[in-house]
Image (cartoon, rainbow, N blue to C red):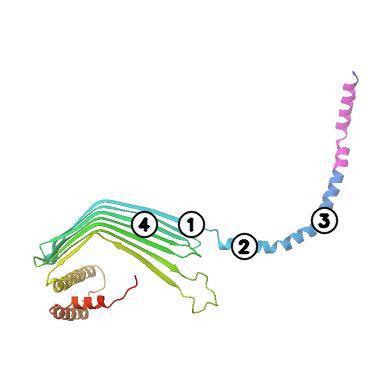
Amino acid sequence: MPQSPNVFNEHMTNSTMSPGTVGQSLKSPASIRSRSVSDSSVPRRDSLSKTSTPFNKSNKAASQQGTPWETLVVFAINLKQLNVQMNMSNVMGNTTWTTSGLKSQGRLSVGSNRDREISMSVGLGRSQLDSKGGVVGGTIDVNALEMVAHISEHPNQQPSHKIQITMGSTEARVDYMGSSILMGIFSNADLKLQDEWKVNLYNTLDSSITDKSEIFVHGDLKWDIFQVMISRSTTPDLIKIGMKLQEFFTQQFDTSKRALSTWGPVPYLPPKTMTSNLEKSSQEQLLDAAHHRHWPGVLKVVSGSKSRM
C-alpha cells in the first residue's frame, strides 16, 4: 500500500521520459494505413468523377430552368365623393357629375406555371349626371351598382370566367331643345355571365377534324321594373343629339391639338378631308331621319331572329 504511489510515480516518469518512442510506435501504423487508403482511393475518385458527370449535367439543366415563383398583387380603392363641374358651351350648358361611395378591391395572382387567378369587385353608391342650359340636357341617376368578376386559368384545366352585375335603380331623362324626348327607369337588375369551355387541352398530331372545341356562355338576366317613354320625334332627335355631341367633341379635340402644337416644333394641319366626310355623313343621316322609319326595320330583324332556349 505505501509503495503504490512510488510505483505510480515511476510509471509516470517512465512514460514521460519516452514519448518519442511511443509516438513513433503509434504513428507508424497510422501512416501506413493512410498511405494504403490514399493509394487505394485514387481509382475510386476517378470512378466517382466519371459516374457523377450526368448528375452534374442534370443539376445544371435544373438550375437553368429556375425555381418556381408566384406573384400576388392586392389593391383597394375607396373614394368618398367626387364632384365635377363643366361648362360645355351651348351644347350641354352647365354639366355636373357627382359620384359618391366608390369602392373597389382586387387580387391578382400569377405564377411561373402559367397559373392565373384574378378576383375583383367594384361598388358604387350613387352617380348622377345633370345637364342644364343647353341644346342637349337631361339627367342620369344610378344607385347601388355592384360588380364582381373572377378569372381562373390553370394549365391542364379548363378556364373559367364569371361576372355578376347588380344594380339597384337607374333613372334617365333626355331633353332636346327644352322638351323631353326620352324617359326611362330600370330597377333591381341582376346579370350573371359564366362561360364553359370544352377544349382539347393536349394538342396531339393525330387530332382529327371531328375533335371540335366548344365554348358556351351562360347568361341570366333579371329585373323588377323596366319602363321607357318615347315620342314620335325621339328617334330623329336622338340622331341629332349624337351629331351635336360628335361635332362638339371634335371641335374641342381640334382646339386642344392646335393649342398643344404651339409648344412643339410640329405645325398644326387641320384635317380637311375628315370634315368633308363628316358633313356628307351628317347630311345623309338627316335625310334618313326625316322619314321616321327606323323602328320597323328593327322589328323586322327581331321578328326574323331565331334562338335556342
Quadrant for residue 215, please give it.
Answer: bottom left
Amino acid type, residue under disc 4 in the picture: Met
Amino acid type, residue under disc 3 in the picture: Ser
Q: CA distance from mark 2 to mark 1?
A: 23 Å
CB atoms at circles 2 and 4 under 8 Å apart?
no
* Stretch of the chain drawn in magenta: 4-26
| Residue where numbered disc 3 is placed | 40
Q: Secondary structure at mark 2?
A: helix
Amino acid type, residue under disc 2 in the picture: Lys
Front-most of 68 and 294?
294
Front-most of 302 and 5?
302
Q: Residue at x 34, y 65 (%)?
A: 219
Q: Residues within 10 Å of mark 3 (few under 14, many from 20)?
A: few
Sequence-earlier tag: 1 or 4: 1
Residue 60 is marked as 2
| Residue where numbered disc 1 is placed | 70
Locate the N terminus and report the quarter of the image it occupies.
Answer: top right
Sequence-earlier tag: 2 or 1: 2
